[in-house]
Amino acid sequence: MSSDGRVTSGARGGLFGAGGRFKGGTDPIMEKFNESLSFDKRMWSQDIRGSVAYAKAIVLAGIITKEEGDVIINGFDKVSEEWASGEFVEKPGDEDIHTANERRLTEIIGVTGGKLHTGRSRNDQVATDVRLWIVEAERDVLKDMATLLQVGAEFSQTHIDTLMAGYTHLQPAQPIRFSHWLMSHMAPIMRDAERLMDMIPRANRCPLGSGALAGNAFGVDREFLAKELGFQGVTSNSLDATCDRDFVVEFLMWSTLLLTHLSQLAEDLIITNLLKGVVIDDAYATGSSLMPQKKNPDALEILRGKAGIALGRAVGFTATLKGLPRSYNKDLQEDKQLLFAAVDTVKDCLAIASGVIATLTLKPEMLMKALCPEMLATDLADYLVRKGVPFRETHHISGACVRLAEESEVSIDTLTLEQLQNIDARFEADVMKVWDYEVSVERKCSIGGTAKASVQKQVDDCLEFAKTL
């Protein structure tokens, strides 16, 4: 600070240097508070792509000559090489990726670099960069989802004959196939992939040429820009284009739902691991600093914990947006760290889930051990249904059999035919065939059921769907 209290340290960089709107430097704390290069530089490639396309567009609009356009494009080739090789040197005043790239371009080609930004604002520039980045990221995520779906379906195929206990309310319910259970976790991942594919066209719209808010004053061909950058079309309103972050919120909310589904898978595996029905590979487990015997399913626990953090991102950024006036406001700078973190987390979680399943060891004998004859009480009721007795009546009859077994402190499958007939005379000798888990499972042969043929169709459909991603 000077003697009169003015800030004398700090720079404004090439955009806002002395002699323009501002006559003093910025507070160093403000520089740190305001900068975004530390995180938005991961969009360096998208920023250069947008600038190259814009250079071509302003050549077509007659703002710069073809020769000047070539000089700018060749200059960006060198900037791109520096980023790719790790040789790009960040300098004080590089507030964000846009100013850093333009500053370096001007260093390489001279004053011609100053013509590039004609009619363009960082408002439409950053909106373009983020859209380009997220569309690429979403397509990459779909590939990762395809891997998980393939791993899950193939593991289900391998273990399609293994039975296990199915639960509701964490209470033994009915026997099912392990493959049916695993495919029940692949089904929501397939829905998540469908949702993500639905989101891409909305994000894949070109805002470039919208200017700061009011549009481009030099007749830039926005449809040319969209085609050049691989967008599916252009945004319809320049005010909205510069401040629209719906596509960011959509991904944040989508990631919350995906990670919720992965969290449910993790919880189920943690419980099944506790019951010794599966063994988590050492690659995805850790030990205790005190207890030598411990093997903790930390990968699954962390996977389970990520869903809550994802929800916080989605709610937090939506709250940031809710009070913003039209059009661009610097609050929107907060989108990128949340978005980048969400994409990174999603990709990590998909990789972990795929690895856990691919290396999982199944213990069929322990899964079978969790089965109990009481889980066939519904089959007992169904037995009488097939003899013409209304289900509501057979439900009560079967319930009475369950109660008798409990009061007698025996397993329900040990009740004699005489005991069953004392409850209902319509029980016949063939009722004893009810106590067969495999028969029970195979009776659930409707689409989506746990019969072998039904599960096989689920596996086949999942593998085919994965090929489309």
Image (cartoon, helix red, strand yellow):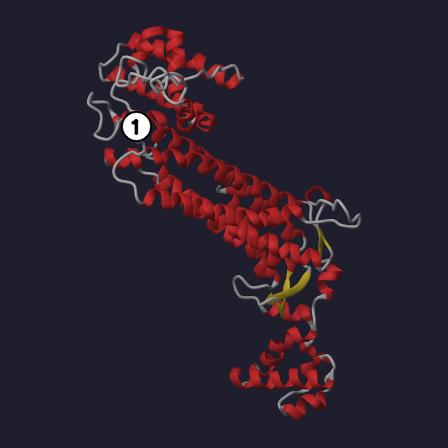
Residue 160 visible to an observer of this rendering: no
Q: What residue did someone put label 1 on?
A: 208
From the viewer's side, name the closer residue of 146 and 39: 39
Label total for image: 1
From the viewer's side, name the closer residue of 110 and 207: 110
Q: Is residue 108 left or right of residue 145?
A: left
Residue at image point 51% right, 19% down: 84
Give the quadrant of residue 37. top left
Q: Residue furthest right?
A: 292
- Mark 1 is surrounded, within 10 Å at the Cα level, by few (under 14), some (14 to 19) or many (20 or more) other residues, namely many
Mark 1 residue type: Leu
Q: Which quadrant is the N terminus positioned in?
A: top left
Residue 236 coordinates in the image, percent (x, y) = 24, 36
Q: Is residue 362 left or right of residue 150?
A: right
Residue 157 coordinates in the image, percent (x, y) = 64, 52
> Is disc 1 placed on a helix, strand or loop?
loop
Residue 198 coordinates in the image, percent (x, y) = 39, 45
Residue at image point 62% right, 49% down: 301
Give the quadrant of residue 94. top left
Residue 197 coordinates in the image, percent (x, y) = 42, 43
For residue 187, above or below residue 326: below
Residue 278 visible to an observer of this rendering: yes
Q: Is residue 365 left or right of residue 125?
A: right
Give the quadrant of residue 36. top left
For residue 165, above or below residue 222: below
For residue 142, above or below residue 213: below
Q: Residue furthest front?
A: 3
For residue 57, above or below residue 272: above
From the viewer's side, name the closer residue of 445 and 80: 80
Q: Is residue 79 left or right of residue 304?
A: left
Residue at image point 37% right, 46% down: 319
